[in-house]
Image (cartoon, rainbow, N blue to C red):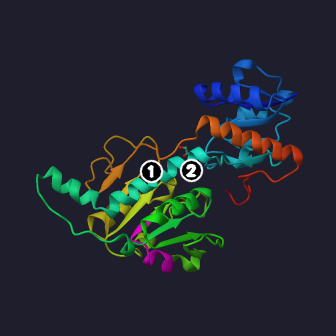
Amino acid sequence: MMTLLYTSDLERGRIWREIFADEAADVGFADPADAPDPATIRYLAAWNPSVELIATLPALEILFSIGAGIDQFDMSRLPPHVRVVRMIEPGIAQGMVEYVTMAVLALHRNLIDHGIAQRKERWVPIKLTPASQRRIGVMGLGNLGQAVLGALRPFGFPLSGWSRSAHAVEGVDCFAGAAALPTFLSGCDILICLLPLTDETRGILCRETLAQLPRGAGLINVGRGGHLVEQDLLSLLDDGHLSGAVLDVFDPEPLPQGHAFWAHPRIIMTPHVASMTRADSAARALIANIRRHQSGAPMEGEVARDRGY
Ligand SMILES: O=C(O)C(=O)CO
């Protein structure tokens, strides 16, 4: 018997257990309360497993992240032979598409300025900018970046994308690598960060990069709080270079009481809810990956551990 040990949210675990029983009965589904025999545990599905837990799993082959990100894992404490897989499932993409579309339209339709005027009881119509004149740029062209670009296309925004390695996305002006970053940034009226958090991308949203956006640009950060240098954003908002930001992720989370973001008139904040793993579709994505692994096929979302994504 091979076992998948699941160590996350109980409600999702209940749904996963049923789906595994119906659709993958050969893979034993266990949570810690089942006290499975460690020698049978080949798969671990977890958000942030402790080093102590990993040390008790001699047969562990694959660590499946419950979420899209894997930056919460301490790779240096994970045995080198253990493979790491991100969660790629349609529920996460759907949630991200909804959130980013909402945020883009909020910035595009001047919701921040209208909110400021509303709180002052001022009637201030703002002339509309056609979508064809609002350039949107996405940093990170993986599964989520591409889903977001696909959803924004029908509005008629000119779209561009930037990533570390070259990508081709239909209808999107794609840029790759550090040398192309300034050109990409100078053409983004709204910048969306959907990058993985790695040593290379930590702090990438800083004064140097954000100042290259056109004056009046807006920022949407749905990557990780660690991408953003908070003081740089605040000073660019306060000096008017940036007109607004929609932030879903912070470092640390929860954002501490009294932090300048909470009450900033040009920041719309949400508490890391842009997207969440959907239980049923994620269970099926995980089973599909286990099947790929069993047949020797490449798994969807496997991480190059040395690269960090
Ligand atoms: O899936 C992820 O990585 C998340 O951030 C969950 O909210």
The answer to which quarter of the image holds residue 129 is bottom left
Q: How far apart are marks 1 and 2 (CA)?
A: 10 Å
The amino acid type found where label 2 is placed reads: Ala
Other-residue count near label 2 (Cα within 10 Å), few / some / many at <14 / 14–19 / ≥20: many
Q: Mark 2 near ligand 1 (CB under 8 Å)?
A: no
| Residue 49 horizontal side relative to residue 267, left or right | right
Q: Nearer the viewer, residue 208 or 164?
A: 164
Other-residue count near label 1 (Cα within 10 Å), few / some / many at <14 / 14–19 / ≥20: some
Task: Judge whether 4 appears above or below 122 on screen.
Answer: above
Q: Mark 1 near ligand 1 (CB under 8 Å)?
A: no
271 drawn magenta: no
Which type of secondary structure does the marked residue at label 2 adopt? helix
The amino acid type found where label 1 is placed reads: Tyr
Q: Which residue: 27% across, 64% down?
A: 238
- Mark number for residue 93? 2
Q: Nearer the viewer, residue 293 or 131?
A: 131
Task: Judge whether 80 appears above or below 230 on screen.
Answer: above
- State the extent of the magenta-drawn residues as a range: 182-191
> Whole-percent x and y of residue 252?
47, 45
Q: Which residue: 75% across, 27% down?
A: 22
> Mark 1 sits on what residue?
99
Say whether disc 1 or disc 2 marks the residue closer to the N-terminus. 2
